[in-house]
Amino acid sequence: MSKTPSTGRSTVLGRGSYSEALRISAILRKETVGGALLVAAAVIAIIWANSPWAESYFGLRDFKIGYEPWHLNLSLGTWAADGLLAIFFFLVGLELKREFVAGDLRQFSKSVVPIAAAVGGVVVPALIYVVINLSNPDAIRGWAIPTATDIAFAVAVLAIIGSHLPSALRIFLLTLAVVDDLIAILIIAIFYTDHIEPIPLLLALIPLGLYALLAQKHRHFFGTKPAAAWLILLPLGMVTWALVHASGIHATVAGVLLGFAIPVLRSKASGGPDAGPGLAEIFEHRFRPISAGVAVPLFAFFSAGVAVGGGAGLLEALTDPVALGIIVALVAGKPIGILGTTWLLTKITRAQLDSSLRWIDIFGVALLAGIGFTVSLLVAELSFGHGTIQDDHAKVGILAASLIAAVLASIVLTARNRIYRLAEAEERVDADQDGIPDVYQEDQQNR
């Protein structure tokens, strides 16, 4: 929170530091492409799964490959969920550490609002889902499905409709999603681990420790020699992943731990957001295209393909309390949790919204956060088992809710984007009339 000079009151959801705004803008541009590929892969899977050639799709998804003695004889769908998605969670680990070590979230005044909003956006949807499915104990296991936000999908929508929206709003969406991912990781690790094999888990500490030691001691070497990371760190990471998978903990958690092990700053003596690109930021630039362009779309392709069996089957799926609970939780619960928590926090602290934003803007982003896709699909499989009726109905609910949330957010934010565009045009005209140099366009690019 910062102070408003005219009123002396604290403000929330400001633009943040200039360097952080530039960095987040770059991330959002990359996630936009990933979101488009994600949606395209999901659409192809749905069409194929409901076509006359559906059997070939499910045959491909369920085709097993891998070394059985190491418990790695897995279907391609499982490889995508446990293996490829670990790359996505590796990037999540990098981003989380970067935010809390050198980003704006290291400052309590700037982190308290997105953290509280993310918690509200998790708790309220979970409660709504549980209430709707209270009469079905088996279905309650899916309580965490509507708690996640798909940042790639959400950013893709925002990029299409919100080119003139304030940078503070974009930063809020990304930081909200970062904290949301952290909560999702904790939920998966704590609530979706049925049993733990202690020996593989303890053995995983050996390659993980060596991986962290090498990354910390030789950060400059791995930063300037891209091949070294592939030849040295990647094998250690794969061994860590395989042992965590064998331990019974979901293997994507290994991706997060590997991300956490990468140093953020260039040296232990430097600090702050201007410390320069550390190894975490370098790796983020290198591996985000692989995550956004390959790993997540392939996971969506193998997970989103649900055979609904025509209109009757779709109606049956949508009226299942599992799907209904997910839809209501994502479409209504997310905005209630995020907007309500943010508003409540301003009242408790007697703060006011930053002058660049309006509450309707926060409502639009809160609607956008109801797009739960990648992690929601993963949690659905963890909750009900791959390919079960409840899993299929849950995925139908996720797809329907994401579509509804995207449409509603588009309606709200498109109207707001039009207002901001007109305001910008008026400011530019006034500047020209007053003979003020036209630095407005440069400022917008910097945002």
Image (tube, rainbow, N blue to C red):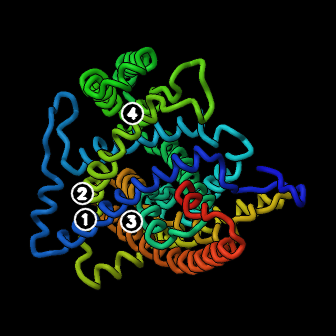
Q: Residues within 10 Å of mark 4 (few under 14, many from 20)?
A: many
Q: Which residue is mark 4?
A: 254
Q: Is residue 195 in sight in this rendering?
A: no
Cα separation, mark 3 vs mark 1, equals 12 Å
Amino acid type at mark 1? Gly
Q: Residues within 10 Å of mark 1 (few under 14, many from 20)?
A: many
Q: Residues within 10 Å of mark 3 (few under 14, many from 20)?
A: many
Amino acid type at mark 4? Ala
Mark 4 and mark 2 lie on one chain; the one further toward the N terminus is 4
Using the image, tell me which numbered label, if any, was put on residue 305. Answer: 1
Cα separation, mark 4 vs mark 1, equals 26 Å
Q: Which residue is mark 3?
A: 394
187, above or below 8, in the image: above
Mark 4 and mark 1 lie on one chain; the one further toward the N terminus is 4
For image coordinates 41% across by 39% down, the residue present is: 284
Cα separation, mark 2 vs mark 3, equals 15 Å
Q: Is residue 444 in sight in this rendering?
A: yes
Q: Nearer the viewer, residue 379 or 206?
A: 206
Q: Residues within 10 Å of mark 2 (few under 14, many from 20)?
A: many
Based on the displayed image, in which of its 4 quarters is residue 246 positioned? top left
Mark 2 and mark 3 lie on one chain; the one further toward the N terminus is 2
For image coordinates 83% across by 56% down, the residue present is: 4
